[in-house]
Image (cartoon, helix red, strand yellow):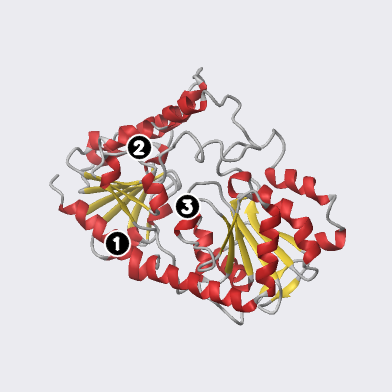
Amino acid sequence: MKILFIHQNFPGQYKHLAPLLARQGHHCVALTLRVKEAMTWQGVRVIPYALPKREGQALHPWLVDFDSKLTRGEACWRAARALKERGYAPDLILAHPGWGESLFLRDVWPEARLGLYCELYHLAGWPHQGFDPEFPSADPEAEPLRIRMKNINNHLHFAEAHAGISPTRFQADTFPEPFRERITVSHDGIDTLRACPAPDVRLEVAGAGTLTRADEVITFVNRNLEPYRGYHVFMRALPRLLRERPGVRVLIVGGDEVSYGAPPPKGQTWKQIFIDEVRGRIPTPHWERVHFMGRIPYDRFLRLLQVSRVHVYLSYPFVLSWSLMEAMACEVAIVAGDTVPVREVIAQDETGRLVDFFDTEALVAEVCALLEDRSARQHLGRNARALIRRDYDLRSICVPRQLDWVQGLLAQTP
């Protein structure tokens, strides 16, 4: 079968599925903005497309988001037409629709089946909007209207797609019926052979030397350090945490950009804003035990989790981070903010400890309690890894489910 992948940053969520389908003998092609020249990656022919140059135009601010998706959709449509003119016709299109690229592909190939990676449907109202009172909307009455416009892209895809797949129940349940009935819940998968405990792990950290499992280490990981992932809450817990645990090392992973939510004031970063807020309450000897690691390679990231005694995870009600589940696979004891998506994998005193997202005192208390209680850490860590292996393992659970989903799409009548 001919399978076409559409993802702005390919392979993205298809990094395991696409090569596997290619190895099974399917003719796999991907259209993406990520590369400049055509190439072959693990059996997948990767073809670039380019965005057109456009003159500036005045747009209603609620329409800017869809305008960017429409631009990508048109560009991808033109690239698809060029493929069709060369005789290419996919049986199946697998697309992440979040950037609008797949809007018009069935206009090019009406007989193709279309399967969507359903990451999130934007919902107005608490807790999806207004969760954090510290960062209110500038115009809360207009917010539901803006969100409705943001979902234009989703609704245009519903009529074209044959089925969807979502990594978690929380994400799938954000989508409205009747399309929700066409979504299969299956996580992308955690490689538990790589993300696993390592008693002899060693991690070199500038300013700390070589850290091992004998050291008291707390970890906090985001793609970018920002309020949507609880960075501000964690930073506000640091003064007391460092005071209570005089030997602890705190390792913080994440970049300075914005992945989700509002940007910081112009010329600033969320990272520095909250460093500046707490730094005056942290003596220099204590501050020297806080290590900002930036973004790090995956192998080093795994060693960081393997050396950790307690991993803190905080997130608004949103897409669940792979890093939480990878930490669980490494048998790290988890202290997490109690939000709906987190509860899919963290059960109180079974696979971790839950605290109110905004309660820094409770966060510090739970972290310190676990640092004092090796037996509790081991209990939570083993249960957490068992859960990930049972429900989210890449090879034994998730890839087979994804393949079943693909086969179901291929079996549908064009």
- Residue 163 x %, y %: 26, 46
Question: Which residue appears farthest toward the bottom when viewing the image?
Answer: 200
Query: Residue tagged by mark 2?
Result: 76
How far separated are the C-alphas under marks 1 and 3? Answer: 21 Å
Whichever of callouts 2 and 1 sits on the residue coming sooner in the sequence is 2
Amino acid at dot 2 = Cys
In this rendering, which labeled residue sits more in front, label 2 or label 1? Answer: 1
Residue 320 in view of the camera:
yes
Nearer to us of marks 3 and 2 is 3
Q: Secondary structure at mark 2?
A: helix
Whole-number angstrom distance, CA of label 3 to CA of label 2: 33 Å
Q: Earlier in the sequence, mark 3 or mark 2?
A: 2
Point out which mark residue 401 bears: 1
Q: On the picture, is 308 further left or further right than 191?
A: right
Q: Nearer the viewer, residue 101 or 304?
A: 304
SS at circle 1: helix
Instruction: Identify residue type, mark 3.
Output: Pro
Locate residue 365, reporting x and y percent: 69, 62
334 in relation to 414, above or below = below
